[in-house]
Amino acid sequence: MNIKETLINFMREQAYKPMDIYELGRIFSIKKAERKVFEKILNEMERDGQIVKTRTDRYGIPDRMNLVVGKLQGHQKGFGFVITEDDTPDVFVPSSYLNGAMHGDKVVVKVTREENRGKKREGEIIRILERNSKTIIGTYEDSKNFGFVVPEEKRIYQDVFIPKESRKGATTGDIVIAEITSWPDKRRNPEGKVIEILGKKGDKGIDILTIIKKYGLPEEFPEKVVSYAEQIPEEIPEEEYKGREDLRDLTIVTIDGEDAKDLDDAISIEKLPNGNYYLGVHIADVSNYVKEKNALDKEALKRGTSVYLIDRVIPMLPKKLSNGICSLNPKVDRLTLSCFMEIDKTGKVVDHRIAETIIKTSERMTYTNVTKILRDEDPELIERYDYLVESFKIMEELCHILNKKRRTRGAIDFDFEECKIILNELGKPVDIKPYERAIANRIIEEFMLVCNETIAEHMFWSNIPFVYRIHEDPDEEKLMHFSEFIHNLGYVMKISQEIHPKALQDVIEKVKGKKEETVVSTLLLRSMKQARYSPESIGHFGLAAKYYCHFTSPIRRYPDLIIHRIIKAFIHGKIDQKRIERLTAEVEYASKQSSDMERLAQDAEREVDDLKKAEYMSERIGEEYDGIISSVTNFGMFVELPNTIEGLVHISTLVDDYYVYNERHLSLIGERTKNIYRLGDEVKVKVLKVDMFSHEIHFELIKEENDEGIEEIIIERNYDVDDIGSSDFNTEDDKSEEYYDETTITDIEKEDAEENTLKQASMSPVGETEDGKENSAVVLTEDFQRKLR
């Protein structure tokens, strides 16, 4: 146990009263010469939020002092929530009690009211431990004697005041980066100076560049990193061939999307005489080039992951490696780390081995072509790849076996539609269509899953530090609400003290193909926690896997890279006690850093998608579409189109009647006509308005002609199209406790209504429901599968 753990355990004791540094020093026999080091440790613990220092310079544990440490998630209306890293409930903070804290800051909040009758804990921020950022990106607006920057981040609700002499030539409409020179307080906005002008709003590429800057994503690699990468030879040195298993004569293929350039996984397969399958998963040996603590490694750890933004990639590694020497390009020698698995007819891995190898892939296949061969039996492609067709059929056999095994044990397989956004040469969206998850995609998915599980179990029993991919059990209270909710739809879910994923997968199977499928799947996902990286192997709930890790993508994910390094050291017997001690700290930091950067990347990727969807619909004002009601709230309903785009039909645009929100049945009901709009109903809509700042899309219902000839009375509403905005999305201050930092403001506000709806519906009789897209009951991220895996 180290000194920090010892201090925390000591302060947790019931008899402990806050002590100053001298009193603690006497307790722990700290000598005078050691006092500076001891003070540094206390300062680090305070900065990390492990302990708190009072105004009288005494130290204590936050929860023993009615304090909470966490990150502030702001709201465009001025209030915020302090989100903790553990499972303790979040704390609502009114705007008057933010005390100068801004979105993303690490803070200490004093709890002033405990959770009661559905109301969340409330508090006041008493200390700011760490500022989220010293810079803000936004739109500059000029006035006579000063200027101000309107932040792109909607959760920063205050504009930044810019003195005339600090505008750096910026004019109204410029997208700028401002550096904060004076932080806000109760009566004053933050003050800053313009340090960079990116361009005018609307300029080509400025929209995505703005998001890149907003999330602090690195655009270029440091010169030192580029220089280091350039020194790596493009050909494999002769000495690297020694000691590796030569698989260059083996039939090995990559299967990826048409646009993929960083090919880090390849597969081989054969059927053994005993009827078992011999699957080889061959992963780029990135760790051979990215050595521990070199410039490439440090930059890769800092980035944590590659970020994919429709028309560009912000890679974790320089392109010379990611698209070059590390990428498993066709018909060239490449260094790999291979996992060979013998799998029986039930999907059980009966034997496996891990080896350093060298391969030469036979073909660079695409998901589209493999699917055409297997599903469509395309004669031209079958002739072209005749020597691979039999292998593809064996792959399909094994894919179905592995999938059946996973589902039998209870793995939860959500099947939401993703979308593909097509841009022209000017960066404008010209088409948005659903992305097919076909048989070829599923083959690779199943093979990578079984490989990741095999590697994780192998390394778990080696008892050395490692980075696992974990998914904790769902929140018990949320799961109870979900159970009660689906009970009102006629479904039963058995909940015992220890919930098993099979019970949840059974629900998914029961609703498949039914009207309420999407809403049930969505609310179930909402009840679950987000997968993350951890040095502890506690299993993966969503996959119903006891052991799981990420091994298969070291070009684009740091956890995969670091575990490759650990596996190779283990294979060669190079891990001694001293190395174990060092690895323990390394895997803990890598797990936290990678989880944080993964979440940041997901937020940026989603915001770019939302931006381009809004831009696409902004060119289609007045056009009509068929859609399905994906969510109903007290301010209207959300309608999802076949291309996965979702928009709001605001209640004020329903002019044929006064509509009342029925929480018990998740519907809007006309007072006079008794006309009902329910989740899952098919409707026709017209694009009314698009707000490009908030990326919100607004629809208007197109009423069908009344078949019964009843005269339709139009109710006059005093509203203007431009008055319908993001403020209409908010209903309550309550938030769910899990997904704040994964949602945009609009999503959070939609979650407010749905969270309330879920609780109300759980106490009501029958409700007819179906839902849409994101990790609230309303909006699901298109990368939800990655989040669970």
Image (cartoon, rainbow, N blue to C red):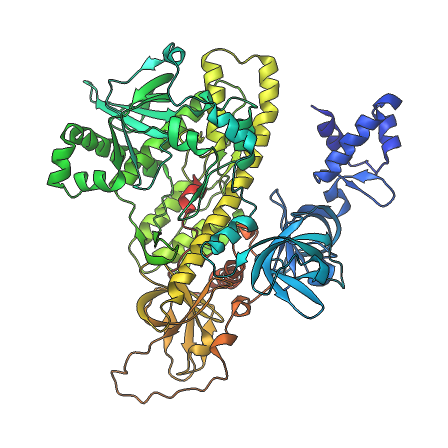
Task: Give coordinates of residue 340: x percent, y percent.
Answer: 33, 21
Quadrant containing the N terminus is top right
Q: What residue appears at the point 33 percent right and 36 percent down from the top-left corner?
A: 445
Q: Is residue 380 above or below residue 298?
A: below
Q: Is residue 699 above or below residue 411?
A: below
Q: Quadrant of residue 501?
A: top left
Identify the residue at the far front of this view: 169
Q: Relative to the observer, which residue lies in front, 291 or 55?
A: 291
* Residue 390 in the figure: left or right of residue 135: left
Q: Relative to the observer, which residue lies in front, 375 or 621?
A: 621
Q: Relative to the observer, which residue lies in front, 62 or 430?
A: 430
The answer to whether residue 163 of the structure is visible from this angle is no
Q: What residue appears at the point 78 percent right and 37 percent down from the top-left corner?
A: 14
* Residue 365 in the figure: left or right of residue 427: left
* Residue 661 in the figure: left or right of residue 263: right
Task: Give coordinates of residue 380: x percent, y percent.
Answer: 12, 39
Quadrant containing the C terminus is top left
Q: Quadrant of residue 137?
A: bottom right
The answer to whether residue 89 of the structure is visible from this angle is yes
Q: Relative to the observer, which residue lies in front, 691 or 99?
A: 691
Task: Give coordinates of residue 127: x percent, y percent.
Answer: 76, 49
Q: What residue appears at the point 55 percent right and 24 percent down from the top-left corner?
A: 294
Q: Is residue 605 above or below residue 519?
A: above
**What is the tally of numbered marks visible in this picture?**
0
Task: Give coordinates of residue 500: x percent, y percent.
Answer: 43, 40
